[in-house]
Image (cartoon, rainbow, N blue to C red):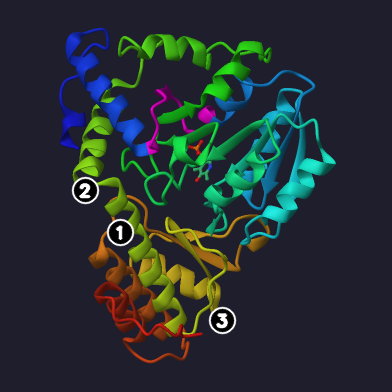
Amino acid sequence: MLRMAQPIIHHRTAEFREIFKRASENLQYLFQTEQPVLTLTSSGTGAMEAALVNTLSAGDEIIHVNGGKFGERWGNIATAYGVTAHPLAIDWGGAPSVDDALAMLDRHPGAKAFCLTHSETSTGSYTDVRAMAAALRERFDGLIIVDGITAVGAHEMRFDEWGIDIAVTGSQKGLMIPPGLAFIALSERAWKAAETSTLPKFYYNLKKAKKSIATADTPWTPAVTLVIGLDQALEMLRVEGIENVWARHDRLGSSLRAAVRALGLTLFADPPSNAVTSINLPERGDEFYALLKKKYSITAAAGQDHVKGKIFRVSHLGYYDEADMLAVIYAIESALTDVGHPHEQGAGLAAALAVFSGTENPVEVK
Ligand SMILES: *Cc1c(COP(=O)(O)O)cnc(C)c1O
């Protein structure tokens, strides 16, 4: 990643084009798609906005799953552009059921898009996008749009095979580089929708970006330094192999979940994301959370909105490995000891090690 500290190169040079071309091809591997994956200079939300403004028109309707801050965001973006958003509201920490999703289609037959959040970072919950896309597609011609911002690179995602129409992700989550780049892929159906979309767009005009990427170029000046970092990060993912990356995140998520249960804590999300684990705070939760951060230097995130003070979230997305998880679990155990939470010393570490060695008790510890 020190490549990002080297002198800047101009973006309209053969040197940059070569890097951008390779990174763009590796993004197709990451998304498992033959479609071009466009790189935008923005945070992830920019790609979410681009998804809607390039395919919809004022007065259109969308359905979006709303079970957290990010699912809610689809609705906020739509509304800002005069698109009517119908939320499929679910309890925070849960995931939408296929039946409820289909019922929304029945209720709103004119919906042009169905927006999902693959890994809802604010709650740590996971949505089975493969199953959802398959069920929706049977009776829905509109666009299946997926916020993959913490899922891509942590959970299996096969854009083409699963019939996803638009997927977005961002640089600072699964891609292990600083914030500032967002990525978006569109299916043929989505590109067709782009032909008739009349919502205003200029910077986020994806047709322009698609035209440019054919010559390894971007319509506007890209964040060159970040693209260089991206190239390196994608190279690492490619070397590890995408299936292995998914499996590693599954192992890391499983180990933390097993440890949490063994320590007598409970998980907030069901089903859980393998990118972030949300855990209900123990008694003396504020003190516990402060110790975790200050005494044990663990960067856990707090809950937001109505789960503030109720949960804490531990990320294990990107550069994490087994040793990192053991350090986190050790810190959680120690902070629990400090606040007098009863548990067997080392029980969390033992549970995680059992997951790593594949010898965990198949009967889950409750
Ligand atoms: C972080 C995140 C976003 C927003 O991305 P920004 O880069 O902050 O704009 C959207 N969705 C999910 C699931 C996220 O985790």
Residue that mark 2 sits on: 240
Residue kind at label 3, given as amino acid type: Glu
Answer whether labels 1 and 3 touch (C-beta < 8 Å): no
Tell me if residue 35 is in the magenta stretch.
yes
The alpha-carbon separation of the residues under discs 1 and 3 comes to 32 Å
Q: Given the image, on which type of amino acid does mark 1 rest?
A: Arg
Tell me which numbered mark, 2 or 1, is placed earlier along the sequence: 2
**Which residue position is annotated with label 1?**
248
Q: Could you say where residue 1 lies in the image, as x and y percent from the top left?
A: 20, 37
Comparing labels 2 and 3, the label whose residue is closer to the camera: 2
* Label 3: which secondary element: loop
Q: Is residue 71 left or right of residue 181?
A: right
Res 197 visible: yes
Residue 30 coordinates in the image, percent (x, y): 34, 38
Q: Say the numbered circle drawn on residue 132.
A: none
The magenta segment is 31-47
Quickly name the residue at label 3: 283
Q: Which residue, as the protein is rendered here, is positioned at the far front?
A: 138
Whether the magenta-drawn stretch holds residue 12 is answered as no
